[in-house]
Image: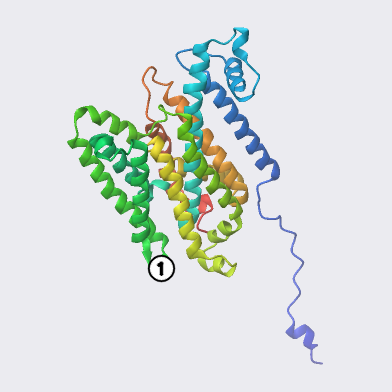
Amino acid sequence: MNPSPITTLDPPRPAAPSPQPPPHRPSAWRQHGTTSLLATGIVLVILFSAGTGPLATSLPEAAKIITGHLIPGMAWMSDGSITVSQDQAVWNFRLPRTLLAGVAGASLALAGALLQTNVRNPLAEPYILGVSAGAGVGAVLAIVAGSTAMAGIGLNAAAFLGAAGATVLVYLLAKQGGIIAPSRLILAGVALGSLLAAITNFLTITTEAQNVYSVLFFLLGSVSAASYGQLVLPGLALAVVGIYAMLRSRALNAMLAGDETAIALGVNVTSMRRTLLLATALLTATTVAVCGGIGFVGLVVPHAVRMIVGSDHRRMLPLVIAGGALFLMLTDLLARTVAQPAEIPLGILTAAVGAPFFLWLMRTNGARAAGVGQ
């Protein structure tokens, strides 16, 4: 008797697979816990930094001074516990530089996160676009030639114009057939940055000795001469780009999966890449114009945040902004206290942290570790 067709043609039915755990996603408590930790750290660093200096001021006294200026009617000076010198030191000198360091760190970290998404490379960093090198040329020209020879353009304005000019050149060099290719963008930025750095070095070694210190201090980065007026332009750029990035977080997530996937999901990749380039350049230019060259913030902070909450931009971007602010505020506090009375330029300290981190990231296969370019 022939066997049943069912028994001869149908293979044995496998046992039902055991249920698999869902893919790992950062839990809500990790997101909220990190947010709370960063917010608390920012407040504490602001108060501690405001009270640190030659004229000692305690944290409660620094808090009294700040709240006394922010809240009308709270005149803490009248009770005699706060001197005029303490008030001026905290409100006019220490607080502006701490806030500028926070805005600069947040801007550079956000610029790094957007650039890494734009080129799908976790090793990308805002300064590879050559924007900071362009700002350096503008600033050095202002220092060497003087504002009179520059038609009244000051150092900050010259640095911003140099950064803007470098952005235009990078865009034109990276554009091919109306499309910005990520590889061409990086290569154009590196090549242009090297050329502009050569021009800066030539201007530095050929200028008078009295100008060399000012040039080097700007190129290495500092917020020592911060004022409230200098917060306006970088703060506005950070607000505009930050809101735009949050609104477009789904499109940014799609770009991580590749151009074909992003196009299939309705993202205009060419337009998005162009906008991200302009946003990155705007953040970097407005920061470098007032703070000088501060590298590696855009590399270290986004990667650290991705390791905590993943690469979803809806979770990542707010923490990148807060983390960048806290990182550079801490760096500035260290820069003005570790070698008192001298002050270490910020670029030296950020490079001391960022360079080893960059090498480690490269060695551990950055694309897989950072969740970019999968």
Query: Residue 140 location, x and y as percent?
Result: 28, 38
Q: What amino acid does circle 1 point to?
A: Gly
Q: Can you see residue 143?
A: yes
Q: Residues within 10 Å of mark 1 (few under 14, many from 20)?
A: few
Is the residue 162 above or below the residue 261 in the image?
above
What residue do we see at 37% from left, 29% from top? 345
- The quarter of the picture where the N terminus appears is bottom right
Q: Is residue 186 left or right of residue 194?
A: right
Quarter location, residue 343: top left
Can residue 294 be seen here? The reply is no
Identify whether 77 is placed above or below 10.
above
* Residue 137 horizontal/vertical position (percent): 29, 43
Check disc 1 and report the residue beneath it.
Answer: 178
The residue located at (56%, 65%) in the rendering is 267
- Is the residue 219 above or below the residue 171 in the image? above
Residue 179 appears left or right of 374:
left
Residue at point 47% right, 37% down?
104
Estimate the x, y position of residue 296 in percent, counting from the top left: 42, 41
Number of marks in the image? Answer: 1
**Residue at the extreme bottom of the image, as rendered:** 1
**Apparent side of residue 357 relative to residue 3 in the rendered image (left or right):** left
Q: How is the image coloured?
A: rainbow
Disc 1 on helix, strand or loop?
loop
Residue 82 image position (x, y, % from top left): 57, 11
Residue situated in front as seen by the camera: 225 or 312: 225
In-front residue for pair 256/188: 188
